Amino acid sequence: MNQQAPRRPAKPYRRPKKDPVRILAFEALRAVDERDAYANLVLPPLLRKARENSGFEARDAALATELVYGTLRRQGTYDAIISACVDRPLREVDPPVLDVLALGAHQLLGTRIPSHAAVSASVELARVVLGDGRARFVNAVLRKIAQNDLDTWLEQVAPPYDEDAEDHLAVVHSHPRWVVSALWDALGGGRAGIEDLLEADNERPEVTLVARPGRATPGELTAALGEDAGLPGRWSPYAVRLSEGGEPGALDAVREGRAGVQDEGSQLVAIALANAPLDGPDARWLDGCAGPGGKAALLGALAAERGASLLAAEKQPHRARLVERALAGNPGPYQVITADGTRPPWVRGSFDRVLVDVPCSGLGALRRRPEARWRRRPEDLDDFAPLQRGLLREALQAVRIGGVVGYATCSPHLAETRAVVEDVLKGRGGPAVQVEWIDARALMPGVPALGDGPDVQLWPHLHGTDAMYLALLRRTA
């Protein structure tokens, strides 16, 4: 008679370990996916709550931030790798599962976390937020991903450059193909330049402060930050760059509104408009698209030094309130109104300087809002085009003869920059306005690689700024 081998006792169920850092990162990614939120708006309150309730330390916050932004920046690359490791189209994988897989892929391929720890931590996260069944799927996929490093995976999932250059760059540098094409057209040149630009889009940008003239100085900010945390700006005389670990909100000047967080490219646009030569008086300035208020606050401070007044207009009421907050305490006269710049309430020909920083695709700020690259579609530009042209057209009507208009946008896409200006000046869609171009390059002294002019396109890889565009026009008749 055969004796049956004794059964092994079943392993007792083990509850999954809750990792607050990875749970927070997952929650941030779900908010970005489900609510079309932006990580730079979602993450700070989550981190603040974690510090208050969970005793989050600085290193925990740094890891959570890296997991969220790194995963979003490299989403296209990780999707291609994950797709090679699953037996179904990615669209058939539940989005929460994809978020856990992408977080795991980033830890495996984009950080120094050991492979076994990255897989283990991701599976534990999956058990907590997805359940044990789907955690087993996550485990199987991540173990496949862990078999290769990033370069080896890219050789497998990206088409060769010589066969399809744009698709190769799109997969390797994690940008949609149409964005790669648009940026390459705007930048011009060969492979090296576009690769440098795409790589810069995937780097964490510096935090830059602006010391608002007459209210704070760069020296005050660097002294408050300390030598190790505060560095002079590269181009703007009012800029201070924060090294890693610097906290803007800890500064009195920032809390009091005498300084603020503002990219150096944004500062250069406002300074160039303020310093552009004009004929006649210089008493009334207009910011026609003022929200959320960074440029308006700098313009208001510069205007106050000359005894000029600023009218800041913003169509959206909640953004107008942000402008009011940014301008609060400005030493010179100013007014904030809620108004549509395409149907303005002001008298035409009544301003000496006008800035319109128009709504756009935001392709110039992909370092700061990496999720925007996955949300935008080429057809979005068709929606922005009439608004951009309408705002510029009204800005040229708002300025007096001899006054100056600055057309700015945080996008390098040709359809949002030079094409808009040329269409308006040629009278397409409205009356032609007689203007002369002002060479904006001369108003950014010391800034290299500004092209042939007269307009200016800034670049992350060349200037360390967002890809801001500026055209300066003086109305002549």
Image (cartoon, rainbow, N blue to C red):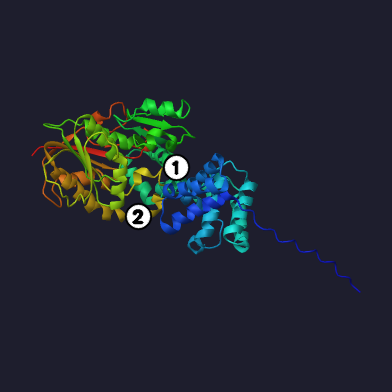
Amino acid type, mark 1: Asn
Residue positioned 21% across, 50% down in the render? 339
Residue 244, relative to residue 38: is it above or below?
Answer: above
Q: Nearer the viewer, residue 449 or 342?
A: 342
Look at the image and tell me in which quarter the N terminus lies.
bottom right
| For residue 387, side relative to residue 195 (left or right) | left
Residue at left 50%, top 46%?
47
Q: Tag 1's secondary structure?
A: loop
Can residue 209 be seen by looking at this rendering?
yes
Q: Nearer the viewer, residue 116 or 41?
A: 41
CA separation in Å, label 2 and label 1: 19 Å
Question: Hey, which residue is sitting farthest right in the picture?
Answer: 1
State left or right for residue 183 relative to residue 80: left
Q: Earlier in the sequence, mark 2 or mark 1?
A: 1
In the displayed image of the protein, which residue is found farthest to the bottom? 1
Q: Residues within 10 Å of mark 1 (few under 14, many from 20)?
A: many
**Is 9 in front, or is 163?**
9
What label does residue 377 carry, if any?
A: 2
Quadrant location of the C terminus in the rendered image: top left
- From the top left corner, tell me how far across and down residue 196 is, in percent: 41, 37
**x, y percentage for residue 12?**
74, 61
Query: Is residue 152 in view?
Result: no
Eyeballing the image, is 191 above or below 164? Answer: above
Q: Position of residue 459 (x, y in %)?
A: 35, 37
Type of amino acid under label 2: Arg
To which residue does mark 1 refer?
Answer: 202
